[in-house]
Image (cartoon, rainbow, N blue to C red):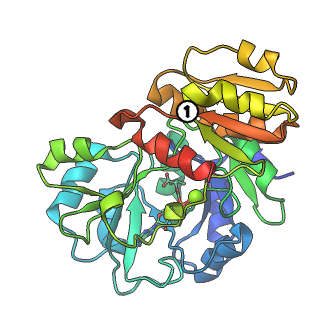
Amino acid sequence: MITITSDYALASERLHRGKLIAIPTETVYGLAADASNPDAVRQIYQVKQRPSNHPLIVHIASADQLSDWADDIPDIAYTLAEAFWPGPLTFILPKAPSINTAVTGGQNTIGLRCPNHPLTLQLLTTFKGGLAAPSANRFGHISPTKPEHVQSEFTQAEVDLILDGGQSIIGIESTILDLTATPPRILREGAITADMIRNICNISVINHKTATSPQVSGSLDKHYAPDTPTMLVTTEKLQDIINDNQNKRIAILAHSEIHEQHLQKSKGAGYWFQMPKEAKGYAHQLYDTLRQADASDAELIIIEAIPNTPEWDAIRDRVTKSSH
Ligand code: TXA
Ligand code: MG
């Protein structure tokens, strides 16, 4: 099993030696390498089994480092960083000419974010460079929000150590904002919403649903997915679907006040995960709960459909892809 530690100086030393380590962030755990070391960056792609044209996010200690990695940085990048960094907002910017395209998946743009986690900020300050870090899961699988999740994805030969920062507070990945587009557009929804961005800088922001061909792996239809077949079912249809699947053991993630009797009445009595009724609490628990359901002997995971209001947008995006 991979060593779990909170020794960020040791973590920094391993990174300087070209090793991969897992780092805690407020969104999900990242699989980190020295972003300026192309061999270390290539190992991320190998270990994750990620296609080499899917770019990585580079994590930096503050907005002061933006210009080490990006070029032609618009003023709104600094305004938004002032408002939301450290935090769950990633910028896509033109990459600086010196930056190796291993980290950008061959593109001329680069993803940059300053994560809001005390231990990882200390690590970044000690390390002094940028850390390329996708979510610390195998490609297409559920993102990790706890050290144990990372431990279950990789071996010690693949990942040198896991920096233990407890459970990720937010629980779903950062908002990705493409600042190379006019107007800027959101490529992946997250805790920072289009409205929050508009409130800060009074610009128009387009959502990816109306944009064409975003270069974001999270934009593949199937992503964030358990190994167990997973369905998204409206509250009204829940009982019918349970009845239809009586021959299977079922795990259910429900957020509304319907009760467990639904499940206990069915022959396949399985697992009932009562999820928080508000979006923040739901996001915090989503991936951990999906992993528990996946690790159980359930043969089918049913997720109760997500409310249609804006605060649930990012969560709806994730569960839709988990269940594709
Ligand atoms: O919250 C997060 O963003 C987490 C933590 C670890 O920081 N990271 C994360 O990384 O979710 P990953 O690799 O699983 O997702 C990053 C997304 C990918 O879908 C990638 O395609 C997109 O960011 N991305 C990175 N650089 C890009 C670029 N230059 N242009 C377009 N998309 C980019
Ligand atoms: Mg990911």
Residue 30 in percent (x, y) is at 59, 55
Where residue 58 appears, as percent x and y from the top left, is 47, 65
Q: Is there any visible trace of residue 186 in the rendered image?
A: no
37 relative to 244, above or below: below
- Residue drawn at x 17%, y 58% is 76
Q: Which residue is mark 1?
A: 234
The residue tagged with tag 1: helix, strand or loop? loop
Q: Point out residue 203 in the picture as x, y percentages from the top left corner.
A: 13, 54
| Residue at point 43%, 60% (across, down) | 60
Q: Amino acid at mark 1?
A: Thr
- Residue 123 vs residue 239: left or right? left
Nearest the viewer among 204 and 132 is 204
Q: Quadrant of the C terminus?
A: bottom right
Foreground of the two, 110 or 24: 110
- Relative to 69, 162 lies left or right: right
Instruction: Name the quadrant containing residue 233.
Output: top right
Is there any visible trace of residue 93 in the rendered image? Answer: yes
The residue at the point 11 percent across, 49 percent down is: 202
Of residues 174 and 236, the one drawn nearer to the viewer in this rendering: 236
